[in-house]
Amino acid sequence: MPELPEVETTRRGIEPYLINREVQTIEIRNSKMRWPVKETVRELIGQKMESVERRAKYILIQSNAGTLILHLGMSGSLRICPSDTELKKHDHFIIGLGDQMEMRLHDPRRFGAILWHRSCEGPVSEHPLLCHLGPEPLSSEFDANYLSRRCKNKKTTIKQHIMNNKVVVGVGNIYACEALYRSGIKPTRHAGNISSARLSVLSNQIKNVLSDAIQQGGTTLRDFLNQDGQPGYFKQRLQVYDREGQPCRHCGRSIKRVIISNRSTFYCSKCQR
């Protein structure tokens, strides 16, 4: 599944092609996505795209009339390509950009989403999918004091806690494992039993691991390619994720795997406590 760094990489990749361009056409080739694609998305036709932003793992294409909300689901990707490029079977949604260029949403599993939020309905931040989200991990809102407050008296594991989108958005399984390793915190520890000093380290490492992944173009997963069709490279730098039985790069002890909330979790029993 594309995680926050992959989505941010995609946002940065498509932004230069969309800003201040007028939407010429919209083609809905398959409306059966996570939620049915409604014809109201065609209200974007004729509108100038004013910004391309990201909230959690949603890409927000904003215009005066409203905001197009895109989610890549489990296997989705966005491509900017010439309009005469051969269509793929799972190119489900196409925006005509003029100058014989298009943006295509490709999604084999169809778990992605294409939603339209009219400006008259209020700020897009009030949309039901967005209004309950926690702060962005790379924002100033997410810091040591905030994380300490949210962890106080919590009996859930720290890994579950930082993967809760109501606490902080976009810390997926890979990046939670890596941030906890960098912080020296065992993922099974209760969030409420970790000192403020160690949570301060964790908040910084969450920012660092996500920033590193964005800089490297995201993590190479079977279903993800970045906007120019090349795989991301962050996987080469993973310390614990998907390395069960391999030696810790720091101490040499074998990386362990446990299941937390039905997700494989990787850690070093010596470096993390």
Image: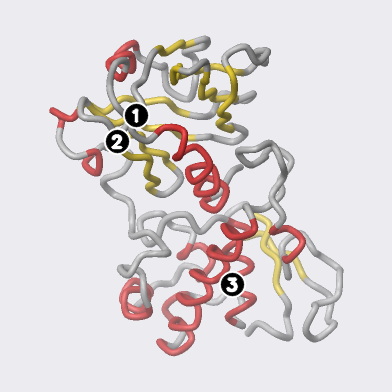
Of pointers 3 and 1, the one earlier in the residue sequence: 1
Task: Find residue 214 and report its horizontal and vertical position in percent.
Answer: 57, 57
Residue at disc 2, secondary structure = loop
Quadrant where the image shows the N terminus: top right
Q: Which residue does the numbered mark 2 point to in the structure image?
A: 50
Q: Amino acid at mark 1?
A: Leu
For the point 74% across and 40% down, which residue is it?
222
Answer whether labels 3 and 2 touch (C-beta < 8 Å).
no
Count the numbered circles shown. Answer: 3
Please, what secondary structure does the residue beneath circle 1 have? Answer: strand
**Residue 78 lies in quadrant:** top right
Instruction: Give 233 or 117, whichever is nearer the viewer.
Output: 233
Locate residue 147: give its quadrant.
Answer: bottom left
Residue 270 image point, x, y percent: 73, 85
Q: Is 4 situated left or right of 139 in this image?
A: right
- Name the amino acid, label 2: Glu
The structure residue drawn at horizontal position 18% and vertical position 30%, both measured from the top left corner, is 119
Relative height, residue 53 to residue 69 (above, below) = below
User: Which mark is nearer the camera, 3 or 1?
Assistant: 1
C-alpha span from label 3 to label 1: 38 Å
- Please tell me which of labels 3 and 2 falls first in the chain: 2
Sort mark 2 into few (<14), some (14-19) or many (20+) by Cα contacts within 10 Å: some
- For disc 1, the marked residue is 68
21 over 128 or under it: above or below: above
Q: Position of residue 80 (x, y in %)?
A: 56, 28
> Badge 3 is on which residue?
188
Q: Secondary structure at mark 3?
A: loop
Residue at x-position 65% and y-position 38%: 228
Other residues around mark 3 within 10 Å, as few (<14) / some (14–19) / many (≥20): some
Q: Confirm or deny contact between disc 3 and disc 1 (CB under 8 A).
A: no
